[in-house]
Image (tube, rainbow, N blue to C red):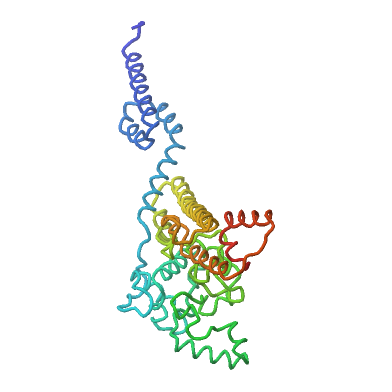
Amino acid sequence: LQGWDADTFKLREGEFTSGVHKNITLRIAQDDPVAAERYMKANAKQMTGADQYSLSTSLETELIAEKSKREAEAILSGGRAADTSAPAAAESRVVGDSGPSNTRAFLYGRLTGGKGKGSVDGLKENFAANLAAMMQDAPPEIREGLGIYSGYRSTERQAQLYASAVKRYGSPQAARKWVAPPGRSNHNHGDAVDLAYNGQSLSHAPKEVVDWVHQNAGKYGLYFPMKHEPWHVEPMGTRGSAGFNGTVAPRNNTVAPRSVAPSFDDIESKLAAISDPDVRDATRKRLYAALETQSKAYEAQEKQAKAELWKYIDQGQTPDQVPMEVRQAAGMAAVSSAWEYMNKAASGRAVDSDETLLYDMRRYAATNPTDFAAIDL
């Protein structure tokens, strides 16, 4: 053995064994960096310090990426946890369908001004779920102040408010800008909430609070339909296509995808349990990127379905003749807009049109269906 003495032989044997384990670790890492790390640790006593350091350096980036991926998948798969700090749930409902008890219970705790539970019980199930999720996901400094200034209202209560508004503003026409007649308000149907901040109307909230709810409402299938009432939030689709502008409405007014994903607190509590700061930071970035990607994917899919829906309408077919999967993907609001468009077209008269203008209009209808549906032709 080239004149090696016993000590040299033992050293070379150790280096060879270490090299074998190093190569095996690198091979395993190609498929599973975490398994490679386990193998390296299990055979650490048979590896040199130099090989262990070299492997740790080589695997570091891939290990962080793989561990953060697994952590993110585990957190997302858990869904939204119940809010255990909320009061007891209601035993009955008024107008809205019976929603998840933790959703109603959470919203009870957000009522202001001595409002009764009926203000929450009367909200439709999916609207209540989306509204609660948006509040739960607000940054802590905003979330703590968010509340419900006015929720469901009976027609009797609406009549009282309308009468007071007529008296205050001097005429029914002037009053209707601020208060709808009985039965005409979405509050009466469980489809509207006036938000509060620190017990007062959202109109008194700091700009950053108003900006946050307006910028994020679309992720939860919600929107603010009236510029003169920036506190008034509704489910998308309650007023036809108005207000739809690249936001992610839940299809068929169902619970929005973001509303069933883990809440802000769910995510942060799980992240806090990750001991490695690098893995924790990478997991946080991966989680919020995944949620944003999910929202954009739903938005793109819905836009494509709406464009396809309007192509069928342009060919003279009714929404009932459009394939069911297209209607479902486009959503109730788009289908309703298509019916409205066809009814208007049927009640009008045929006119001569410039072919270039007609082509441009059809192209606009296909590429921007919701905006086109809102145009009064």
Residue 308: percent from left, percent from top: 51, 53
Q: Residue furthest top?
A: 2
Instruction: State the residue in front, 36 or 197.
Output: 197
Report the residue at 36% width, 50% height from top. Answer: 74
18 and 160: which one is in front? 160
Residue 61 is left or right of residue 371, and the answer is: left
User: Horizontally, is 224 left or right of 104 in the view?
Assistant: right
The x and y percentages for residue 51 are 41, 26
Can you tell which quarter of the image residue 106 is in? bottom left
The quadrant where residue 243 appears? bottom right
Q: Is residue 232 left or right of residue 105?
A: right
The mark total stands at 0
Residue in view at x 44 percent, y 59 percent: 321
| Quarter of the N terminus within the rendering | top left
Q: Position of residue 13 (x, y in %)?
A: 33, 17
Residue 251, position in %: x, y? 44, 61
Q: Hey, which quadrant is residue 179 in on the image?
A: bottom right
Compared with 130, 358 (above or below) is: above
Q: Quadrant of the C terminus?
A: bottom right
* Location of residue 362 with respect to 128 vertically, above or below: above
